[in-house]
Amino acid sequence: MDETAPSGHEDFDPKLTEERLARLVRLAARAFNRSLQMRLQDEGITFGQWIFLRILWYNDGLSQRELSQRAHLTEPTAHAALTKLEKQGVITRQKMDGNKRTLRIFLTPKGWELRDRLEPMAHDVNLISLKGLEEDEVRVLRKGLLAIITNLEADENAAAEQGIKVPATRSSF
């Protein structure tokens, strides 16, 4: 394995080739998020808002609870991001007939227009991230990551069946 520093990573530690997989996945996810956020900022959209827009582009009209579940984020986090998107005129919240409590989230024309500008940015980030990888390497990587996700979700579900819940990431002191 080549242990030279990737371009722009003068602080690259060759020992990362032996680093825990969990840390490498976290660093990769952080790098993806930062790269996309750099691009989104010109549109006034945060990475957190992007997550919800991406879901709504394919499932318009979900409730806040459904959105937070699909995003794997808490409802308060969803509420904050959706409130900002509503103030920006990107979404609307509507009560549906027969259920006065549940609000459904719908994209406005502005929200739909953002799709044409934002999705290519995410596509570019993905292409940049895969430079130097062969198609078969990408296929193996994708398969491996999906297996990891499935395994860890099963672990979390098994824990939940025993009454063990994932603690909040923010503690109140």
Image (tube, rainbow, N blue to C red):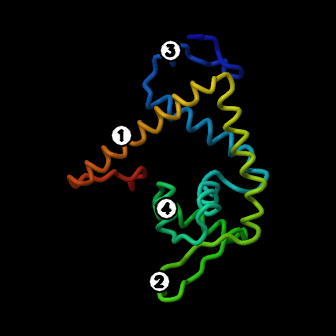
Instruction: Using the numbered discs, state the Cα–Cα distance from disc 2 to disc 4 in whole angstroms.
Output: 17 Å
Label 1 sits on residue = 151
- Element marked by disc 1: helix
> What residue type is disc 2 on?
Arg
Instruction: Using the numbered discs, state the Cα–Cα distance from disc 3 to disc 2 in whole angstroms.
Output: 53 Å
For discs 1 and 4, the disc positioned in front in the rendered view: 1
Instruction: Using the numbered discs, state the Cα–Cα distance from disc 1 to disc 2 in whole angstroms.
Output: 36 Å
> What residue type is disc 3 on?
Lys
State the residue at coordinates (66%, 53%). 46
Q: Nearer the viewer, residue 103 or 45?
A: 103
For discs 1 and 2, the disc positioned in front in the rendered view: 1
Q: Is residue 166 above or below residue 58?
A: above
Instruction: Give neighbour class at mark 2: few <14, some 14-19, many 20+ (Cα, 10 Å).
Output: few
State the residue at coordinates (62%, 19%). 11
> Which one is earlier in the sequence, the residue at label 1 or at label 2?
2
For discs 3 and 2, the disc positioned in front in the rendered view: 2
Label 4 sits on residue = 68
State the residue at coordinates (20%, 52%). 162
Instruction: Using the numbered discs, state the Cα–Cα distance from disc 1 to disc 4 in whole angstroms.
Output: 21 Å
Q: Nearer the viewer, residue 161 or 89?
A: 161
- Element marked by disc 3: helix
Instruction: Give neighbour class at mark 1: few <14, some 14-19, many 20+ (Cα, 10 Å).
Output: few
